[in-house]
Image (spheres, rainbow, N blue to C red):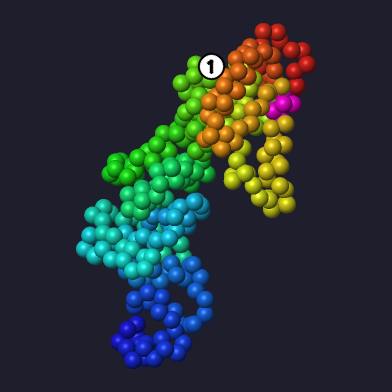
């Protein structure tokens, strides 16, 4: 008997009405099978103590960009390593806490899923670093939770996670922003940039959160990527147009905005560096704003303005 059915009954149903999804797992119909059902079938095949991790788990946490080609499950050390098709279960001697469920599927924490993705599924270092930064930037994880997970993980294979953690701690919210910060860090005129800090009027009205801001010069830098700013909002707003138009709010307060694309950073880093260095150097000490960043007022310059907007 199998789940209350005799072997002959199952064989007969598979020839007529059912379909075999994985060894020992059937769908009681011949119709299409959606992603949720296939994942549930994978969990059934992996066993009652299996917990989803890796790229598919990352995606289920709402973090796009991970490779979902393999459903990876952790199982206790008493179980066996097995694989079939695009499903794999691997033994671990570590405890496997269940952090949440996706339907009927047990999942590890996002932090552990990221680490397992790096250790067991071989994403590119760039992709894994980008996923780590994105998880932190979107509030799906925290520096503390990520550090705690890394304390239990092997160093080999998790370097990109550690690098992403470090980059985010220094202010980068994406790989292009990290590239920008790395480019500026060795240049004295640009080393003191403030990354992803909210800029407000003295009256507390938020002007924006530039990718980098140089308060001594009143210069902001924005990395604009169609990949991250394209599409439409629920109300039909063109997100790319909105992103570009938001730069105009800074100019209303006499802040100079320098826009750069990820491609420019990758293909012409020296040109990007020279442009920022020139503009920042030429505008050191000028009057603008005033604006407030981290509780400090900037921008009045040597000669206080009398037409200060609150």
Q: Residue at x 43, y 67 (%)?
A: 39
Question: Which structural element holds mark 1?
Answer: loop
**Mark 1 highlights which residue?**
189
Compared with residue 115, is residue 78 higher up or lower down, i.e. above or below?
A: below
Q: Position of residue 162 (x, y in %)?
A: 37, 38
| Badge 1 density bin: few <14, some 14–19, many ≥20, Cα 10 Å | some
Q: Main secondary structure of the magenta part?
A: helix
Position of residue 153 in the picture relative to residue 171 (left or right)? left
Q: Residue at x 43, y 81 (%)?
A: 19
Confirm whether the magenta stretch covers residue 25.
Answer: no
Q: Position of residue 152 (x, y in %)?
A: 29, 44
Compared with residue 140, is residue 39 higher up or lower down, i.e. above or below?
A: below
Position of residue 230 in the picture relative to residue 268 (left or right)? right
Position of residue 101 in the picture relative to residue 273 (left or right)? left
Q: Position of residue 169 (x, y in %)?
A: 45, 33
Q: Residue farthest to the left?
A: 78
Compared with residue 175, is residue 115 higher up or lower down, i.e. above or below?
A: below
Name the quadrant of the N terminus.
bottom left
* Residue 42 visible in this rendered orientation of the protein: yes
Q: Residue at x 64, y 15 (%)?
A: 283
Which corner quadrant of the image does residue 150 belong to?
top left
Q: Residue farthest to the right?
A: 307
Which residues make up the magenta segment?
Answer: 249-253
Q: Residue at x 53, y 20 (%)?
A: 190
* Residue 116 visible in this rendered orientation of the protein: no
Name the quadrant of the C terminus.
top right
Confirm whether the magenta stretch covers residue 250.
Answer: yes
Q: Position of residue 156 (x, y in %)?
A: 29, 43
Please tell me how many numbered marks the rendered image carries: 1
């Amino acid at each position: 008997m199998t789940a209350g059915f005799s072997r002959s009954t199952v064989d007969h149903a598979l020839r007529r009405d059912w379909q075999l999804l994985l060894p020992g797992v059937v769908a009681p119909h011949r119709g299409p099978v959606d992603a949720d059902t296939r994942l549930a079938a994978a969990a059934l095949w992996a066993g009652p103590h299996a917990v989803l991790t890796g790229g598919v788990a990352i995606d289920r946490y709402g973090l796009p960009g991970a490779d979902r080609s393999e459903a990876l499950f952790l199982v206790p050390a008493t179980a066996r390593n097995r694989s079939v098709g695009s499903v794999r279960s691997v033994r671990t001697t570590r405890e496997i806490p269940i952090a949440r469920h996706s339907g009927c599927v047990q999942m590890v924490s996002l932090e552990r899923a990221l680490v397992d993705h790096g250790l067991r599924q071989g994403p590119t270092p760039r992709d894994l670093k980008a996923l780590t930064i994105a998880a932190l930037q979107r509030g799906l994880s925290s520096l503390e939770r990520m550090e705690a997970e890394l304390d239990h993980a092997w160093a080999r294979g998790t370097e990109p996670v550690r690098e992403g953690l470090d980059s985010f701690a220094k202010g980068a919210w994406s790989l292009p922003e990290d590239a920008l910060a790395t480019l500026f860090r060795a240049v004295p005129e640009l080393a003191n940039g403030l990354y992803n800090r909210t800029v407000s009027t003295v009256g507390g009205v938020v002007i924006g959160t530039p990718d980098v801001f140089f308060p001594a010069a009143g210069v902001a830098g924005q990395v604009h990527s169609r990949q991250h700013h394209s599409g439409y909002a629920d109300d039909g707003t063109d997100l790319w147009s909105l992103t570009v138009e938001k730069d105009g709010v800074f100019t209303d307060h006499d802040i100079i905005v320098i826009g750069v694309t990820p491609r420019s950073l990758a293909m012409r880093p020296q040109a990007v560096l020279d442009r920022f260095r020139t503009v920042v150097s030429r505008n050191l000490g000028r009057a603008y704003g005033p604006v407030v960043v981290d509780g400090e007022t900037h921008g009045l310059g040597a000669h206080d303005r009398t037409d200060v907007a609150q």
